[in-house]
Image: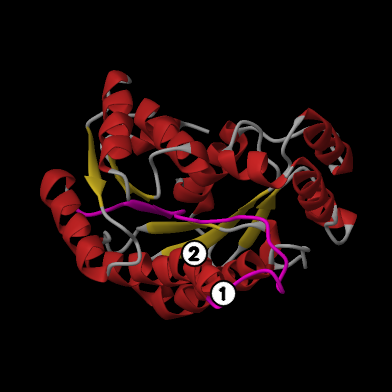
Amino acid sequence: MDTSQFKGRHLFVAGGSSGINFGIAQAFARAGAKVTVMSRSADKVVSAAAQLQALGAQAIGIAADVRHPEAVQAAFAQAEENFGPIDVLVSGAAGNFLASALDMSPNAFKTVVDIDLLGSFNVARLAHAHLRKPGACVIQISAGQSFIPTPFQAHVCAAKAGVDMLTQVLALEWGAQGIRINSIVPGPIADTEGLKRLAPGEDNLKAMAERVPLKRLGKIEDIARMAMLLASDWGSYITGAIIPVDGGLALSGPRDFTAAAAASRREKA
């Protein structure tokens, strides 16, 4: 795929200071895109923007919490003032931890729903006025828990299922305006904080890789490449899709690795 098509385009990444989302930002930066990174931590967004600038990209970092609509609105206004309308929006702010439903407080459950689901709604709704129309592409970063019941992940399963349904509803509502929106569902991606929480330690990571039909963990660039495909001319007829990039893990049935990881944590406690 010719990535030169992204030169000069404006990418906005919510939750983009680390992990998969930052990897997406780096890929677009290398292709010549202008990049806005938004995250809760002021220190992290400043660092992320500096790293993108070191790649030769025009980039800014904005500190804002996806749970606070006023802050998100201000971030979009600042981004457009700097780089013009948004061509590609990546919405990937997320929270996670291991806990059984009985051990989880309502506030703990609500925290993840507020970040993952309400945050995704806030980002998409408030971005709308700042998206290039027609032609903008919105990419939501989901999770396999959205359609695979996963022990010790009730909060994430509920929140991410909502995110994917939001993707499909907005695809219907915004399609006539020339806005496409899709969800990417990453599998177990190496060197990410999320995987380290869900499969802590080398033994758990090896067991996870063995569950994947391709017999390996994914790489951040696997997700970045899918994001670029969806945002490219090659993806111009794709909208409302929920796309696993997981080495086939979704085909392997219910996920019990979280139960093993939770047991391992209890033994260490």
Is residue 33 visible in the rendered structure shown here?
no
Label 1: element kind:
helix
Residue 123 location in percent, x, y? 35, 64
Expressed as whole percent of the image width and height from the top left, the position of residue 241 reads 60, 64
| Majority secondary structure of magenta residues | loop
Q: Are marks 1 and 2 in contact (CB under 8 Å)?
A: yes
Question: Viewed as shown, does residue 32 lie left or right of 138?
Answer: left
Q: Residue furthest front?
A: 269
Q: Which disc is residue 162 wearing?
A: 1
Q: Quadrant of the C terminus?
A: top right
**Residue located at (41% from left, 57% from top):** 137
- The image quarter in which residue 71 lies: bottom left
Q: Is residue 143 visible?
A: yes
118 relative to 167 in the view: left or right: left
- Residue range (magenta): 85-106
Nearer to the camera, 33 or 211 = 211
Q: Is residue 203 above or below residue 137?
A: above
Q: Is residue 226 left or right of residue 256?
A: left
Callout 1, which amino acid? Gly
- Of all residues, the one furthest to the left in this rendering is 81
Circle 2: residue type? Asp
| Residue on which the image places disc 2 | 116
Mark 1 to mark 2: distance in Å? Answer: 9 Å
Q: Residue at x 69, y 35 (%)?
A: 218
